[in-house]
Amino acid sequence: MTGDTVTNNKASADALHWSSMREAGTLTGLRFLWAVHRYFGRPAVSFLLRPIVWYFVLFRAQARRGSLEFLTTHWQCYPEFWKKKPGLSASLRHFREFAETVVDKLMAWHLELDPNLFYIRDKETHQRLLNDTRGQLIIGSHLGNIEYCRGFMQRYKSQTINVLLHDRHAQNYVAMMQSLNPQSRINVFQVDEFDITTILQFKDKIDAGEWIFIAGDRTPPSGNTRTVAVTFMGRTAHLPIGPYLLARALECPVKLMFAYRNYCGDDNRLYFDVVDFADQIKLPAKRRQQLLQDYAQQYANHLETVCREAPYQWFNFYSYWADSPHSTPPGDH
């Protein structure tokens, strides 16, 4: 990876970096919500989520600012979506959909998903993926509910799925999901760096026909993290190059996946997107920087397409853009 002219991200305890945010929810709290759902149903859970939503809005200033900044940027970029400039009521809905999604993430690991709820935009691409016996690198995001992707795909094909996380603060959530379904063929790995040993481990999994999920919309909290600047919703954001370097090392097909649900609307469907991103990523030395830039921008374009339709499903509650008033330059994290 040496020689790539990209932006370095230094890890620190800076409260403005997403990785320093406290874990939202204790293991006890998640177990309580699961018990309520089991005995009283989803309406009771939704009722109990209301004070949690108000807590976030009132006491999580960083998350509240991140929500309002994103929604306002969306309003500026896609005014036809909005009746008025987003304010407190829009942020409340934003956090409400986030809370509902957290519960649905737990459900997706334990309950059978009704295939009739899914709206698959590109059925041909979806079917090609199901018929492909090769290992795949799946790049997702913190938009919507990626657990729906994992659960949906696993139930339609006996498939081992490996999830790569940088989120140390999400350990309670992962522990809860795994306890709900210990027989699941979904493995979760905490990864801070892609060293040779780690890459060889995942190469073996790809060669065995397994899938690897990784998010492409957050920079890992690592001192060696590298990013490139992309245009996202008319502004400059920094995205990681790790997924594309990993794809090059794994020499496997790359797909994008997005899944989301409109909890506050009348449409109860689960929207599911599979995008053919690359059959194989190659990064020749002379074009490496430009290719990394191109791949990250292509990803940002696809992500924005989904954001345009479902802004309330955006769950990066921090100052996301390089010019955010409450953010610091990537090199200062």
Image (spheres, rainbow, N blue to C red):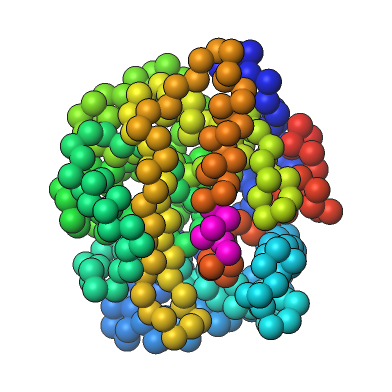
Residue 311, magenta (yes or no): no
150 left or right of 296 in image? left
In the rendered image, the vertical position of residue 3 relative to residue 136, given as above or below: above
Q: Residue at x 48, y 30 (%)?
A: 244
In the rendered image, the vertical position of residue 138 relative to residue 92, given as above or below: above
Q: Residue at x 58, y 47 (%)?
A: 300
In the rendered image, the vertical position of residue 41 relative to residue 146, given as above or below: below
The answer to whether any part of residue 242 appears in the image is yes
- Residue 311 on image: x %, y %: 58, 67
The answer to whether any part of residue 175 appears in the image is no
- Residue 203 on image: x %, y %: 31, 24
Q: Nearer the viewer, residue 169 or 104?
A: 104
122 left or right of 223 in image? left
Q: Which residues are magenta?
A: 303-308
- Residue 147 on image: x %, y %: 36, 57
Q: Residue at x 22, y 52 (%)?
A: 127
Q: Residue at x 51, y 15 (%)?
A: 284
Q: Quadrant of the N terminus?
A: top right
Q: Nearer the viewer, residue 30 or 212?
A: 212
In the rendered image, the vertical position of residue 121 relative to residue 53, given as above or below: above
Q: Quadrant of the C terminus?
A: top right
